[in-house]
Amino acid sequence: MIRRILTLLALSACIGIAAAKAPNIIIILDDDLGYGDLGCYGHPTINTPNLDRMAAEGLRFTEYYAPHNLCTPSRAALLTGRLALRSGMEGSEKHHVLYPYNDGGLPQTEITIARALKTAGYSTCAIGKWHLGCLPQYLPTSHGFDYFFGLPYSNDMDTPSPKVRNQDSDGRHPDWHHFNVPLMRGTNIIERPANQELLTQRYTAEAIKFVREHRKEPFFMYFAHTFPHVPLFASEKFKGKSKRGLFGDTVEEMDWSVGELLRTLREEKIADNTFVFFTSDNGPWLIRKLNGGSAGLLRDGKGGTWDGGHHVPAIAWWPGKIKPGVTSELASGLDLFATSLALAEVQQPTDRIIDGIDMRPLLFGGKSQRDTIFFYAGPELRAVRYNNYKAHYITQDGYSKEPAAAHNPPLLMEVDQDPSEKFDQAKDHPDELKAIERIVSMHKAMMVPGKAQY
């Protein structure tokens, strides 16, 4: 009897230890941050010491791709591990992203990272920009998040007129009162219009509060910054600080926010049990000129299927678990769903196709299991990367008024040697093109679009 009691006590202790080791998971998502917009990715005048330190202490990705080239589909894909077309969140020719007047959103049938982790006892919160539906049934609290503090959609929406909305495109920055976007806590609007100059500061305070309140239990935080999406606003502390102008001010304030969050993890002594992943939802909004970012040497930006629209910064950080380094292995925002569930020892759904891949082998010193990236524009598959080669079936610069150009045979770029995608290599590599065409055929055969939500 005594032996049985001791065995039960030992088992309980082991269970307690196992539960204590369930890692916290934080995903930090910037809005419209380009591949070339951080110091650790080569920007000469934007000062990002905290992200540079995060990169030095963690794993910096050079071949990471956002799932899509625009806000709504990219966020839907990241949180569900599924290409947005499968959930009806890919957009249409008329509406590329959700607007306040759209009555659709991320369907309840979809399983988000938050909803999956709730089954393992995680506390969950969404802070910042949502943009997956603004009706109550589509807000974060209806998708597995215990708590939401942020904007239901982009910060340039709900304007009194198109003229005011587009002022920022030529360098004139409107007053934040001109944007009637609401700040929400849960399902309640607490401020309208939101004072956008204070958003980054307030988001950061909410994030730190959540960490401190939940430091003794596993938690998942989805922290989606509003900036550097236009219109650009910075607090008094950061306004005029950057040599890169107001765009740089917003990025440097976001960098400060990341530093404050990581500092809090260290102070609470949970840094060694917290997986943090930083990235962007898509490439830079180039048509905004100086108010938009840079894709570095990559071609084009947001809205396009050249690499500049999808290929973005990414940093994974977990002291004592992830070794410092730089990886050129392929990875995607689709992979964060499978990776988060695997870290929490939660089984993936088996009743649907999951496009994401578990990144743990790559994170912990091995090779990536991913060899393919799909590039969609709306419901149309326009390009596919397989290993080092990328085939373009249809090309069009982001936000271009020129018609899309179809290519038969497709253009073929050897992106390792030609990251700016200038030189067609189709004639020299017919075998690679045939391999990609087989992948496309299998992919299309398995693609069942969800009910359009736009």
Image (cartoon, rainbow, N blue to C red):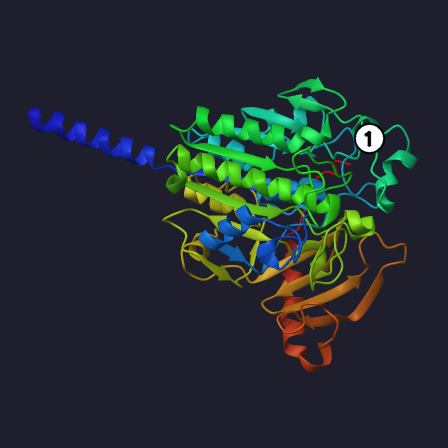
Relative image position of residue 435 (x, y in whole percent): 62, 71
Relative image position of residue 17 (x, y in whole percent): 28, 34
Residue 436 placement, left or right of 323: right
Q: Is residue 319 above or below residue 406?
A: above
Q: Residue at x 60, y 69 (%)?
A: 388
The image shows a total of numbered marks equal to 1
Asked which quadrant contains residue 371, the reply is: bottom right
Q: Give the amino acid at mark 1.
A: Asp
- What residue is shown with label 1? 175
Q: Residue at x 69, y 56 (%)?
A: 375
Residue 222 placement, left or right of 4: right
Q: Residue at x 8, y 29 (%)?
A: 3
In terms of secondary structure, where does tag 1 sit?
loop
Note whether residue 283 is visible.
Answer: yes
Relative image position of residue 360 (x, y in whole percent): 44, 52
In the rendered image, which quarter contains the C terminus? top right
Q: Residue at x 79, y 35 (%)?
A: 156
Q: Is residue 86 above or below residue 310?
A: above
Asked which quadrant contains residue 384, the reply is: bottom right
